[in-house]
Image: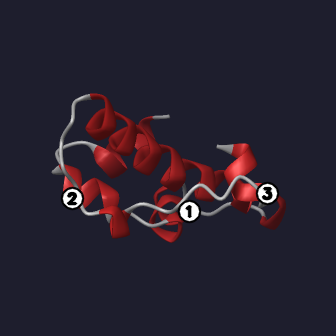
């Protein structure tokens, strides 16, 4: 999706982490209500990928920028 690439290309890691699901929806020109969860997945997948990179490489980071994986809610099971 070129639109998604444009949302993140050229951003620093901190800027990419600050991208919200609303910005994803706007970049796509809107989404039907039953597809809004896709924008949440996009936001969460970037955060998850960055957190994974930091963890695997022993890089210290501000944990408050990353949602905790509770494992019990729908969002955590989907990521």
Q: CA distance from mark 1 to mark 3?
A: 20 Å
- Front position in the image: 40 or 53: 53
Which of the 4 quarters of the picture holds residue 35?
bottom right
Horizontally, is 79 left or right of 22 in the view? right
Residue drawn at point x = 56 percent, y = 62 percent:
25
Q: Residues within 10 Å of mark 3 (few under 14, many from 20)?
A: few
At horizontal 41% and vertical 60% (from top left) the residue drawn is 66
Residue denoted by label 1: 25
**In the rendered view, would you say 40 is above or below 20?**
above
CA neighbours of label 2 inside 10 A, class few (<14), some (14 to 19), many (20+): few
The local secondary structure at tag 1 comes to helix
Give the mark count. Answer: 3
Task: Name the N-terminal-most of marks 3 and 2.
Answer: 2
Which residue in the structure is indicated by mark 3? 74
- The crowding category of the residue bearing disc 1, from other C-alpha atoms within 10 Å (few below 14, some 14 to 19, many at least 20), is many
Task: Give the percent coordinates (x, y) of residue 14.
Answer: 21, 58
Can you identify the residue that label 2 sits on? 14
75 sits to left or right of 28: right
């Amino acid at each position: 999706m070129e639109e998604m690439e444009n949302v993140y290309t050229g951003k620093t890691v901190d800027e990419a982490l600050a991208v919200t699901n609303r910005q994803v929806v706007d970049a796509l020109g809107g989404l039907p209500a039953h597809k809004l969860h896709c924008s949440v997945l996009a936001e969460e997948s970037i955060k998850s990928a960055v957190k994974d990179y930091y963890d695997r490489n022993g890089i210290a980071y501000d944990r408050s920028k990353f949602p905790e994986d509770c494992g019990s809610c729908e969002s955590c099971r989907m990521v």
